[in-house]
Amino acid sequence: MTDTLPGHAGPTRMSDAAHDQWTPVIRWDKRNALGLRDRAVDLLEAGHVLWLADHGFAPTLAERSLLTPATSDGRAKNISFDVKRALVSGSALQGDALAALGAMLARFAHESLTLVHGLFPDYNSHIEQGLVSFRPVGVEGRASSVRKDDTRLHVDAFTSRPNRGRRILRVFTNLNPHGVPRVWHVGEPFETYAQHFLPTIGRYSPLAARCLQRLHLTKSLRSEYDHLMLGLHDHGKMDEDWQRTTDYSRFEFPPGSTWICYSDQVLHAVLSGQYMMEQTYYLPVAAMAWPERSPLKVLERLKGHALT
Ligand code: SIN
Ligand code: FE
């Protein structure tokens, strides 16, 4: 490690040599902000998590009453907010309380966009704001199946929304009012993970992809890229031995801090925590500073053909 991370604690399964080569989480604070600003895109696109240690989201006194699992309808793992339609789903709240929740999520959406614009100005005209999610329920005991179990290392891939290579950029913030950190494991670089699991993934079938689309199981045609990303996600989560033995580092993201990563590239797992908000963004590969570092280009290089 190049820096001592106050948020970095507990067991780690990387050899010292691996640590010297790869720092998964880059701490960013007032002391080093100037030096890091010029490198923000480089670090992000290389697959690091950018951890803004003293940049949090501050709920107002009134909003603090929204920090309870009772805001959830108990069915979904998160409450989501569609910025464009100003629509909250997955919440049990109604009336003024629901409006207050929507206002808090809208403010977070706005603040996260300002942050992303400031850090990655070259993305500005290409980035698309997706859903905000709010997770008021504790991570422990939440998963209903291995595939949905985010306590296992994975990269994000969507079952029903093919994205054909488009990047998934996520801004996370911990707003726990009781000082409880959000604990993540961050694993090996994407290419190592892809090389390990690609040989286990069956052939892509355009016919099967068309059937899924016709049955409305996918919102558009699943590309070979989506097929492979889902394969990496599922096979990685299901491989108990690999989950037990692969390298990772453990990080504790304290309340009042924010972290940003390409979650389709950074191998991650969430171990514990409660009260997190996250804003998803989408970016075309062509809008990246280094498109060749995208999962799409890495997988195309490893497979030897185009995937979308
Ligand atoms: C995930 O994207 O796997 C979940 C992250 C979190 O809930 O902290
Ligand atoms: Fe994830």
Image: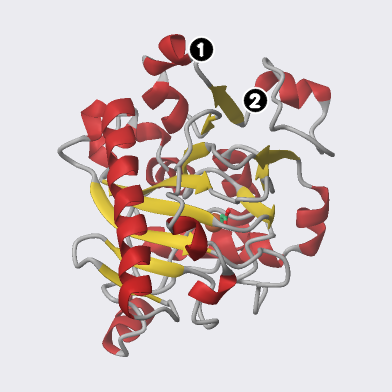
Q: Quadrant of residue 227?
A: bottom left
Disc 2 under 8 Å from ligand 2? The reply is: no
Residue at the extreme front: 61
Foreground of the two, 164 or 219: 219
Q: Is residue 40 above or below residue 68?
A: above
Q: Quadrant of the N terminus?
A: top right
Foreground of the two, 254 or 287: 254
Q: Amino acid at mark 2?
A: Trp
Q: Quadrant of residue 152?
A: bottom right
Q: Quadrant of residue 39?
A: top left
| Label 1 secondary element | loop
Residue at the image position 65 percent from the left and 68 percent from the top: 149
Residue at the extreme bottom: 215
Residue at the image position 38 percent from the left and 41 percent from the top: 297
Give the CA separation, mark 1 to mark 2.
Answer: 19 Å
| Label 2 secondary element | loop
Judging by the rendered image, the residue that carries numbered circle 2 is: 22
Residue at the image position 50 percent from the left and 57 percent from the top: 64
Disc 1 under 8 Å from ligand 1? The reply is: no
Ligand 2 quarter of the rendering: bottom right
Q: Is residue 117 visible?
A: yes
| Coloration mode | secondary structure
Residue at the image position 82 percent from the left and 29 percent from the top: 15
Relative placement, left or right, of 157 versus 239 is: left
Q: Nearer the viewer, mark 1 or mark 2?
A: 1
Where residue 85 appears, as percent x and y from the top left, is: 19, 67
Number of other residues with Cα within 10 Å of mark 1, as a class: few under 14, some 14 to 19, many 20 or more: few
Judging by the rendered image, the residue that carries numbered circle 1 is: 32
Q: Quadrant of the C terminus?
A: bottom left
